[in-house]
Image (cartoon, helix red, strand yellow):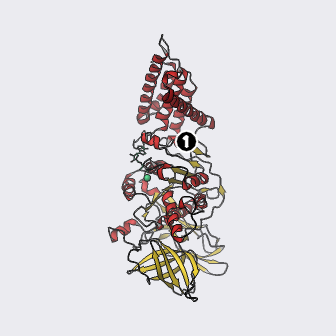
């Protein structure tokens, strides 16, 4: 996209929040980025629209969105077009990094100034760090885009050094021996079919709006152990799957995302904190550095990278941050890793689109979102997926924060259409402190396989549903009209809800349940559902009997809750099944 390396410039003619217009006399390309000089700083912008200049036929007018705070910008400020689309730097060192929404490393910026100042820049990846490069091809070999020419160890992972995906067949002209290099040094020279030479380094830039291809896209089929019981039983997600997670303010979306960060079994977790409170993001940075990766015992940050684009940063950068995070995810998927991308919140992302299209004067769709918001949301989720060719996957779990918890609004609806799994958080459950507040009965669906059979999963749901119905009967016409056997069914449902669906995200043991323990719990649940428990009447009236049933179930629930937070040895774990057997027989 470079025009003979000639500097192409323009000057600002209008400024409206993050949207600016500039007059230019050269060529400008749709989607290219530009640098706007404001008080000696250089701010990043992206070209959205190009129009003829009716006042000056030699010129054109370009409309751009600026990703950084424009305070101090003035009419006449200089714009320089870069010829390059918005891109992300891909290479070793991505893991453990914490960036803002434009891939500026926050720690490096922090060394420059305690406050983020617009226009501050630092290299996205450490340029001095040395990596132990081992070549896997030799001079004379033929390679093409996506092929590995070697690798470097990145923490526990083997980071493959790939030929940029847009290159066709190339001959390896030269490649260095095994040695320590940084990301600015050339490690190999390739020649393409047109005899053009390409110098490869450990890192390369890739346009964030061009999805990195799949080798062979496959249907997500292997269930992820997230550690969260209600998810793994009733609304599971597979490697490469997509989930929309809507919930009203304060219902627990962020706590759930943090749980997944800590406990979901994956090689890599990417967090895109998009438009949420800055304080939360700071907590994550502090907490996660001290936590261990559940599968390796390493520091949790070694499998993570974070884009912290909080509510205090410019809105336009939110759009960029989600695309940057997706591209990093695709890059690691191509290397064969299982990546989970958590975006909190996609509503804030959609709001950025809404603000932009509003300012551009587009005809608005429902609730002033752009008309094509469903397609944009679909497009985002479609970049997730499993790749049979590489063995890698990118799972995308996005929170949605609908105003007033109204799931009928456009972003929630579009997310529901675009995703394979849906975790609806309910205000009622959050108010009742039933955490995680995912409502097993409302809006909770999944196309992915659970850790238990469909029959067992449906029986569990059925029981919860019937118990819910009885609960409503009790609250409308009173307990008296409910027969004893129905009341027992109600108590069974209450027990499954309280002891299985609810889980303490902050308790060391209870916070995470792995598949082997799920199996034990499922057996207990199924036994309880299938049993006809004989409470001996001993001449009791119905009401007295119901009182007894409640006491007995209360005791069971208390026991089971304790088991959740204490049973660790094989014997203790097996104790659940024994306890349920005794309970069913009503033997003390
Ligand atoms: P949201 O992101 O949906 O606005 P948060 O995730 O910040 O909501 O949750 C709000 C509060 O609810 C938390 O600070 C915490 O006190 C409580 N909470 C949410 N989920 C859980 C959970 N799984 N276990 C215990 N407390 C929770
Ligand atoms: Mg939140």
Q: Quadrant of the C terminus?
A: top left
In the picture shown, does residue 57 fall above or below 273? below
The image shows residue 246 at horizontal and vertical percentages of 51, 50
265 and 120: which is toward the camera: 120
Q: Residue at x 60, y 56 (%)?
A: 385
Left or right: residue 312 compared with residue 526: left
Q: Secondary structure at mark 1?
A: loop
Q: Is residue 276 above or below residue 114?
A: above
Q: Residue at x 62, y 38 (%)?
A: 454
Q: Is residue 90 visible?
A: no
* Mark 1: C-beta under 8 Å from nearest atom of ligand 1: no
Q: For this rendering, which residue is in front, 468 or 305? A: 468
Q: Position of residue 303 (x, y in %)?
A: 47, 56
Reading the image, the residue beneath label 1 is 442
- Whether residue 122 appears in this view of the structure is yes
Give residue 136's position: percent from left, percent from top: 58, 67
| Front in this rendered view, residue 283 or 366 | 366
Picture coordinates of residue 336, whole percent (x, y):
58, 58
Image quadrant holding the N terminus, namely bottom right
Most distant residue in the top direction: 539
Question: What is the count of numbered marks?
Answer: 1
56 up-or-down from 281: above or below: below
Q: In the orientation shown, which residue stands out farthest toward the left?
A: 114
Mark 1 surroundings: few (<14), some (14-19) or many (≥20) residues within 10 A: few
């Amino acid at each position: 996209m470079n025009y003979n390396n000639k500097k192409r410039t323009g000057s600002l003619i209008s400024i409206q929040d993050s949207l600016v217009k500039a007059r230019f006399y050269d060529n400008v390309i749709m989607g290219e980025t530009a640098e706007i000089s404001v008080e000696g700083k250089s701010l990043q912008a992206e070209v959205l629209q190009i129009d003829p200049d009716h006042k000056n036929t030699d010129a054109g007018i370009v409309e751009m969105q600026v990703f950084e705070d424009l305070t101090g910008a003035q009419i006449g400020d200089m714009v320089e077009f870069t010829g390059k689309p918005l891109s992300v730097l891909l290479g070793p060192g991505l893991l453990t990094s914490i960036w803002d929404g434009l891939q500026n490393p926050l720690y490096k910026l922090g060394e420059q100034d305690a406050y983020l100042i617009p226009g501050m820049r630092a290299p996205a990846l450490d340029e001095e760090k040395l990596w132990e490069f081992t070549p896997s091809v030799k001079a004379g070999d033929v390679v093409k885009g996506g092929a590995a020419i070697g690798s470097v160890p990145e923490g526990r992972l083997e980071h493959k050094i790939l030929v940029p995906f847009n290159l066709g067949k190339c001959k390896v002209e030269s490649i260095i021996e095994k040695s320590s290099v940084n990301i600015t040094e050339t490690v190999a020279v390739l020649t393409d079919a047109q005899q053009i030479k390409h110098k490869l380094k450990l890192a390369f830039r890739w346009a964030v709006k061009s999805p990195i291809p799949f080798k062979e896209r496959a249907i997500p089929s292997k269930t992820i152990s997230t550690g969260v019981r209600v998810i793994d039983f009733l609304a599971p997600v597979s490697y490469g799957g997509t989930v929309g997670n809507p919930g009203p303010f304060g219902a627990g979306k962020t706590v759930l995302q943090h749980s997944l960060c800590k406990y979901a079994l994956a090689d890599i977790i990417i967090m895109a904190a998009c438009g949420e409170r800055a304080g939360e993001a700071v907590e994550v940075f502090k907490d996660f550095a001290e936590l261990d990766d559940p599968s390796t015992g390493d520091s949790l940050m070694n499998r993570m990278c974070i884009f912290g684009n909080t509510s205090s940063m410019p809105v336009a950068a939110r759009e960029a941050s989600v695309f940057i995070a997706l591209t990093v995810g695709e890059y690691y998927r191509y290397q064969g890793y299982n990546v989970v991308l958590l975006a909190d919140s996609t509503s804030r992302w959609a709001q950025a689109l809404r603000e932009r299209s509003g300012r551009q004067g587009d005809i608005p769709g429902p609730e002033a979102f752009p008309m094509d918001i469903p397609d944009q949301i679909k497009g985002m989720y479609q970049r997730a997926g499993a790749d049979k060719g590489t063995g890698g996957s990118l799972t995308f779990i996005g929170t949605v924060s609908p105003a007033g918890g109204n799931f009928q609004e456009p972003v929630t609806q579009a997310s529901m259409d675009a995703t394979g799994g849906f975790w609806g958080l309910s205000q009622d459950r959050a108010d009742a402190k039933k955490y995680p507040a995912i409502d097993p009965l409302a809006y909770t669906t999944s196309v992915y396989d659970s850790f238990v059979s469909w029959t067992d999963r449906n029986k569990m749901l059925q029981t919860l549903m019937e118990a819910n119905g009885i609960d409503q009967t009790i609250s409308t016409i009173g307990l008296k009209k409910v027969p004893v056997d129905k009341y027992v069914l109600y108590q069974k449902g209450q027990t499954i809800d309280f002891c299985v669906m609810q889980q303490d995200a902050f308790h060391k043991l209870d916070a995470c349940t792995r598949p082997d323990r799920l199996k034990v719990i499922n057996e207990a649940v199924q036994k309880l559902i299938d049993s006809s428990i004989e409470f001996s009447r001993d001449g009791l009236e119905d009401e007295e009997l119901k009182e007894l049933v409640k006491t007995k179930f209360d005791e069971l629930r208390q026991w089971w809750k304790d088991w959740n937070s204490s049973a660790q040895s094989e014997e203790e774990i097996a104790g659940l099944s024994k306890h349920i057997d005794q309970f069913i027989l009503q033997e003390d």
